């Protein structure tokens, strides 16, 4: 532990017992509610279990079955589309809005509040808000009809070709404000003098962004990237609220498929195997986030 | 409104010529104003829909210009739709869960930040890592743990899992803040004979009030908005909090859009209140642990 060596000697006192208790209570709660269950999921993923009696160890069978499970593969593909679409659109939107709303001027506060307001609603509420828009005589179809594009009208959430993207739009709508807030904070910590200096030197707006601002946002980018990927692997509520993965699994994500297998069909071993896959995919990004957090701690 | 606090001091535009600024301002508002309107349109639309009557919607469609005004949607959602009861359930879960999370997190953060506990960095990062785990890997075992504790399908179980799952993040953020409190302050108190508990209660906690407020605002919306934990540890429909009750209601009122819209407004209002009341704290809470 490098930090211990740097501590001032006077803090190297014995830790009083009551302080140990201060640490032990929360640590035990987290151990019991998070780490112990997580370990159990790994064990369960190698078993077959319907919740009654004892779990039967089956080795790697669950994972082999996953590999040949069409629905799982579809959910996996959808999750990749989701991660790219959800991450890409909310980062592009959030960054663009942060750049537009970075400099103080009249109305900026109002615009910012309006854009991050959706973030306070639950994903379930967001899902319902958008279900209302998507329904056959809802705003989206009515709007398309009004501008003469009747041919594009459809049952957005009931059509296997559009369901996933319809849910994606709703999720991005809610996420953009969050990403914007992160980038606004990042932009605040960039050096305005560099920007001004390059403007004086005749750099265009794009050049100033690309070569002056963007490199200074590296730290924020790492966090935004890790957070959006972790979020997209966790995504459950909004899909559950809008389509429950349907129609015909067309908007199924790994998380919704896992929930169905576990809590609807009680294939607890199989569901745990899906959860382990989700964990494995998230791991690299969790580590990215933790490395970043470590740097911050050390700073 | 407290939006002003989000805006950095207006120095960097001062050197531009006023004419230039006004011209650029028009273009800016010409893009931003419509965009913002589109952004809030879905909310406004649902809000309006909630106050229309069933007959109006059935006859003219959800997207038509409203010609009716009624509270039927709300009274139906609050009464038979059970949103009133669900709202109360959510409050019963959220308040203790937020208070308990912050209390336990502040204990851990205090121990880890002010005392020379061996391996404290590792402990802190492990706790944070727990919060980053995908909940899916916990769902099945957690519901089993709750069963074996005999609290499955109770609100106590929901409170406990919210506390357990959130602790790592809250501890990490509070640790960062507590570490920045100068050692001289607590050292002076110690020399005057204050014990670790007194230093925690009289010095550290009062100084942490801003970060506790920010985390509290954030935790309130997270816990209030949760769906997955609620449907994992609760079975009885009458015990479901707002988010889950909203989805059930939607199944029961398939084409009663005014009821569905009213119920979503009811579910959205509490977090919107928290947001407007604590906007400053809320935003700084979001930034905690993500950027500095």
Image: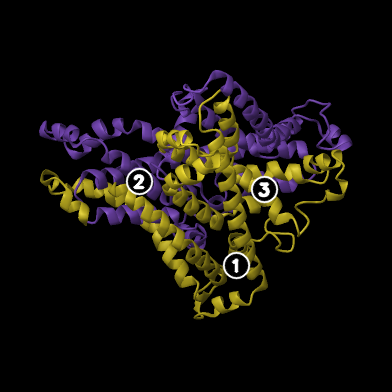
Chain colours: A yellow, B purple
Marks 3 and 1, how far apart at CA: 31 Å
Asked if residue B239 is positioned above or below residue B207 in the image, the reply reads: below
Q: Look at the numbered disc 1 and give the secondary structure of its residue.
A: loop
Q: Position of residue A189 (x, y in %)?
A: 40, 37
Residue plotted at (53% across, 37% down): A99
Residue in the foreground of this view, choosing between A299 and B276: A299
Residue in the foreground of this view, choosing between B15 and B8: B15
Residue in the foreground of this view, choosing between A285 and A279: A285
Marks 3 and 2, how far apart at CA: 34 Å
Q: Look at the numbered disc 2 and give the secondary structure of its residue.
A: helix
Q: Are marks 3 and 1 in contact (CB under 8 Å)?
A: no
In the image: residue A136, left or right of residue B276: right
Q: Position of residue B145 (x, y in %)?
A: 45, 60
Q: Position of residue A152 (x, y in %)?
A: 83, 49
The residue that mark 2 highlights is B171
**Callout 3: residue from which chain?**
A
**Callout 2: residue from which chain?**
B
The residue that mark 3 highlights is A169
The residue that mark 1 highlights is A266
The nearer-to-camera label among 1 and 2 is 2
**Callout 1: residue from which chain?**
A
């Amino acid at each position: 532990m490098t930090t211990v060596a740097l501590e001032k000697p006077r803090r190297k006192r014995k830790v009083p017992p009551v302080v140990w208790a201060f640490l032990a209570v929360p640590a035990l709660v987290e151990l019991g509610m998070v780490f112990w269950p997580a370990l159990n999921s790994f064990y369960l993923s190698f078993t077959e279990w319907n919740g009654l009696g004892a779990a039967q160890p089956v080795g790697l069978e669950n994972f082999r079955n996953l590999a040949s499970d069409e629905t799982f593969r579809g959910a996996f593909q959808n999750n990749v589309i989701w991660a790219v679409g959800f991450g890409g659109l909310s980062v592009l939107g959030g960054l663009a809005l942060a750049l537009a709303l970075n400099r103080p001027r009249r109305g900026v506060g109002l615009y910012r509040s309006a854009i991050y307001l959706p973030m306070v609603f639950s994903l379930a509420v967001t899902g319902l808000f958008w279900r209302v828009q998507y329904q056959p005589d809802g705003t989206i179809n009515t709007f398309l009809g009004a501008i003469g594009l009747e041919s594009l009208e459809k049952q957005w959430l009931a059509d296997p070709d559009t369901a996933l993207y319809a849910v994606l739009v709703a999720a991005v709508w809610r996420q953009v404000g969050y990403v914007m807030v992160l980038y606004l904070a990042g932009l605040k910590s960039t050096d305005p003098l560099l920007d001004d200096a390059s403007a004086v030197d005749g750099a265009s707006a794009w050049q100033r962004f690309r070569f002056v601002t963007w490199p200074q946002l590296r730290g924020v980018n790492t966090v935004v990237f890790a957070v959006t990927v972790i979020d997209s692997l966790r995504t459950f509520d909004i899909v559950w609220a809008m389509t429950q993965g349907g129609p015909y699994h067309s908007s199924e994500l790994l998380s919704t498929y896992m929930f169905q297998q576990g809590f609807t069909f009680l294939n607890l071993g199989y569901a745990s195997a899906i959860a382990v896959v989700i964990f494995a995919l998230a791991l690299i990004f969790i580590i990215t986030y933790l490395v970043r957090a470590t740097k911050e701690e050390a700073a | 409104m407290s939006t002003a606090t989000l805006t950095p001091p207006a120095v960097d535009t001062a050197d531009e010529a006023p004419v230039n600024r006004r011209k650029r301002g028009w273009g800016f508002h010409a893009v931003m104003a419509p965009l913002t309107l589109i952004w809030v349109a879905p909310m406004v639309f649902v809000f309006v829909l909630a106050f229309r009557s069933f007959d109006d919607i059935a006859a003219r469609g959800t997207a038509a210009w409203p010609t009716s005004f009624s509270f039927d949607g709300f009274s139906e959602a609050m009464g038979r739709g059970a949103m009133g009861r669900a709202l109360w359930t959510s409050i019963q879960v959220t308040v203790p869960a937020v208070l308990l999370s912050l209390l336990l997190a502040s204990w851990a953060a205090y121990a880890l930040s002010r005392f020379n506990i061996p391996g404290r960095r590792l402990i802190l990062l492990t706790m944070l890592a727990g919060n980053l785990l995908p909940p899916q890997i916990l769902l099945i075992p957690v519901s089993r743990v709750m069963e074996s504790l005999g609290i499955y399908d109770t609100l106590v179980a929901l409170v406990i899992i919210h506390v357990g799952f959130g602790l790592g993040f809250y501890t990490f953020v509070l640790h960062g803040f507590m570490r920045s409190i100068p050692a001289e302050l607590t050292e002076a108190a110690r020399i005057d004979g204050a014990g670790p508990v007194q230093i925690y209660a009289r010095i550290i906690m009062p100084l942490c009030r801003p970060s506790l407020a920010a985390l509290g605002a954030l935790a309130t919306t997270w816990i209030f908005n949760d769906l997955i934990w609620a449907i994992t540890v609760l079975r009885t429909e009458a015990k479901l909090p707002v988010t889950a009750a909203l989805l059930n209601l939607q199944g029961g009122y398939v084409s009663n859009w005014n009821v569905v819209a009213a119920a979503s407004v009811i579910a959205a209002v509490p977090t919107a209140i928290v947001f407007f009341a604590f906007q400053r704290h809320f935003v700084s809470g979001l930034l905690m642990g993500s950027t500095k």
